[in-house]
């Protein structure tokens, strides 16, 4: 038998997504309206029907909020995206420069520490790139206050589109397809880290705003 608290509880993931994309000052109102309608549909047509409705409304709400983010403040949002693109171009090259500088300085020691060098030249470099992308996402989100997810997702989409174009070029030159797919997946991890950075900043801002009212 389904308990009452579980009965009126909407999909948690959908609620989190709406909360991420909604301006902090409007989140409580929008989520409250969705919850009220969800509870009504759940009692009238069943939980399964209400959950499907809630997910459809989540997609529509997020699409509307993304469009509104550019409509309300197109120039500041575009500036945050362009600034993030330039910043990413700068910080993404730092790990390679640091590794090259360290290698040139301590080249004589690397033969006895080959495994350490191999790690930093491969997995360590990928980890550093992800950290750099996460940092860029946080900076873009800080600059695009109220539109954190719109700005970071736009920047992530731009990089994913660039990866797609590069992959098409890769396959057109008849290079190894398996390696190309692996490279594409790793390259898409950077844009994902940018979006995660936006989600972190948005969540922190939401917590700061809602904390006084819950006290």
Image (cartoon, rainbow, N blue to C red):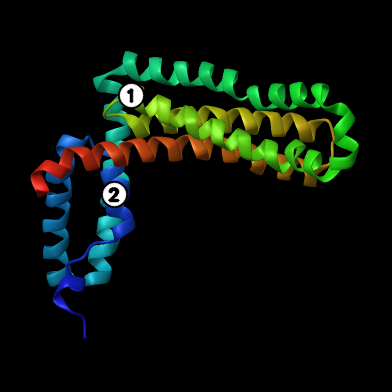
Say which quadrant the N terminus sits in. Answer: bottom left
User: Secondary structure beneath disc 2?
Assistant: helix
User: Secondary structure beneath disc 1?
Assistant: loop
Residues marked 1 and 2 touching at CB (< 8 Å):
no
Q: Position of residue 201 (x, y in %)?
A: 35, 35
Q: Which residue is mark 2?
A: 58
Q: Position of residue 75 (x, y in %)?
A: 33, 13
Circle 1 crowding by C-alpha within 10 Å: few under 14, some 14–19, many from 20:
many
Q: At 58% from the left edge and 18% from the top edge, which residue is drawn? A: 90
- Residue 81, disc: none
Circle 2 crowding by C-alpha within 10 Å: few under 14, some 14–19, many from 20:
many
Q: Which residue is mark 1?
A: 144
Q: At 63% from the left edge and 40% from the top edge, which residue is drawn? A: 127
Using residue 150 as the reference point, say whether residue 1 is left or right of it.
left
> Mark 1 or 2 closer to N-term?
2
Q: Residue furthest bottom?
A: 1
Q: Position of residue 66 (x, y in %)?
A: 32, 33
Using residue 200 as the reference point, say whether residue 169 is left or right of it.
right
Q: At 49% from the left edge and 35% from the top edge, which residue is drawn? A: 134
Q: At 14% from the left edge and 45% from the top edge, which residue is drawn? A: 28
17 over 128 or under it: above or below: below
89 over 21 or under it: above or below: above
Q: Of tags 1 and 2, which is closer to the observer?
A: 1
Using residue 169 as the reference point, say whether residue 54 is left or right of it.
left
C-alpha gap between disc 1 and disc 2: 22 Å
Q: Quadrant of residue 29?
A: top left
């Amino acid at each position: 038998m389904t308990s009452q608290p579980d009965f009126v509880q909407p999909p948690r993931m959908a609620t989190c997504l709406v909360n991420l994309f909604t301006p902090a000052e409007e989140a409580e109102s929008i989520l409250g309206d969705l919850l009220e309608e969800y509870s009504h549909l759940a009692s009238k047509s069943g939980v399964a029907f209400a959950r499907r409705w809630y997910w459809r409304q989540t997609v529509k709400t997020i699409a509307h909020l993304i469009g509104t983010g550019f409509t309300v403040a197109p120039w500041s949002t575009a500036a945050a995206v362009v600034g993030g693109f330039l910043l990413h171009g700068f910080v993404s090259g730092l790990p390679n420069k640091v590794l090259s500088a360290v290698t040139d300085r301590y080249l004589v020691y690397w033969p006895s520490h080959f495994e350490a060098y191999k790690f930093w030249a491969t997995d360590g470099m990928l980890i550093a790139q992800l950290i750099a992308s996460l940092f860029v996402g946080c900076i873009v989100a800080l600059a695009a206050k109220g539109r954190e997810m719109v700005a970071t997702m736009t920047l992530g989409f731009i990089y994913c589109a660039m990866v797609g174009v590069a992959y098409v070029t890769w396959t057109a030159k008849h290079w190894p397809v398996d390696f190309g797919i692996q490279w594409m997946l790793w390259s898409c991890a950077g844009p994902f880290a940018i979006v995660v950075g936006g989600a972190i900043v948005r969540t922190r801002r939401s917590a700061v705003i809602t904390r006084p009212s819950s006290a």
